[in-house]
Amino acid sequence: MKHTILDFIKLSKKEGKKLLTLLLDPDKVLLTEVETIANKINNAAIDLIFVGGSTVAKNDTEKLIGALKRHIVKPIVIFPGDYSQITNTADGILFLSLLSGNNPEYLIHQQVKAIPSLQKTDLEIIPTGYILIDGNHKTAVQKVSNTFPISQSEISKISATALAGEYMGKQLIYLEAGSGAKKSVSSEIISETSKLINTPLIVGGGLRTKSAIQNAFDAGADIVVIGTAFEENSSFLDKI
Ligand code: 1GP
């Protein structure tokens, strides 16, 4: 089994190097803009690229990653909303399990449905515990997964869910306030969770400023994901 991306993440954590990830949603990126976007990514402090969305038209993920690959050597990881987004054009995939909700479809059934497609790829598969946290905004993940996020006040429940994920063998834990969240995951939640787990911690959702990203890193995030801030203003990366 390949471990290139995960090894890079673990080594970065060990060395105290924080990683910044750009999320691109195939629904929102025009293929004609890919070269310009790729140039920005190549010149920015972006370490990883996630590609995915809650609802993506068939083949759009493959087309976007294929186009990005013509210009970018940084690792591209599928961040799938469902198993139809699997494509061998990427380097790896977050093999997500939605640990915060009570919907077996996103806890295990989608993962089983993904197997026939994954067996035809040589993607690096990265077991990831995905924890949805209330961002004061009904997000696409919440609607599509038909689950409720955990309230930001339930800090011990969030950190316990993360540790349970680690004990279940997840290699990454993702605290997600949801794309376009009005309230990003609080520093207290990030801090309490990162203290409890050894697994690299990803934080995303609603981080729109350089200081918000820095605060998430300072609180203990190993990887920060930005999506909307770049979608709304492609020069956002120039400031980082
Ligand atoms: C969503 O965490 C990511 O899955 C990014 O969120 O679009 O709010 O940056 P934003």
Image (cartoon, rainbow, N blue to C red):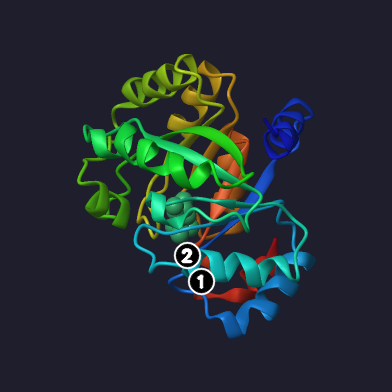
Q: Give the left or right position of residue 67, taking residue 219 as reference.
A: right
> Measured from the top left, where is residue 122 in percent x and y?
64, 44
> Measured from the top left, where is residue 231 in percent x and y?
51, 71
Classed neighbour count for the residue bearing mark 2: other residues with Cα under 10 Å, few (<14), some (14–19), many (≥20): many
| Residue 228: mark | 2
Task: Tell me if I can see residue 31 in this picture.
Answer: yes
Q: Amino acid at mark 1?
A: Glu
Q: Give the left or right position of residue 134, taking residue 18 as reference.
A: left
Nearer-the-camera pick, 10 or 225: 10
Q: Quadrant of residue 133?
A: top left
SS class of the residue under badge 2?
Answer: helix
Q: Is residue 39 above or below residue 182?
A: below
* Residue at the outermost top position: 167
Which residue is painted at 26% across and 47% down in the image? 145
The residue at label 2 has a CB less than 8 Å from ligand 1: yes
Nearer-the-camera pick, 163 or 192: 163
Which residue is painted at 43% across and 71% down in the image? 27
Q: Amino acid at mark 2?
A: Thr
Task: Tell me if I can see residue 206 in this picture.
Answer: no
**Alpha-carbon distance for marks 2 and 1?**
5 Å
Q: Are marks 2 and 1 in contact (CB under 8 Å)?
A: yes
> Measured from the top left, where is residue 75 in percent x and y?
70, 52
Which residue, given by chain and number where applicable, does mark 1 sit on?
A: 231
The residue at label 1 has a CB less than 8 Å from ligand 1: yes
Which residue is painted at 32% across and 22% down in the image? 157
Q: How many marks?
A: 2
For the N terminus, give its image quadrant.
top right
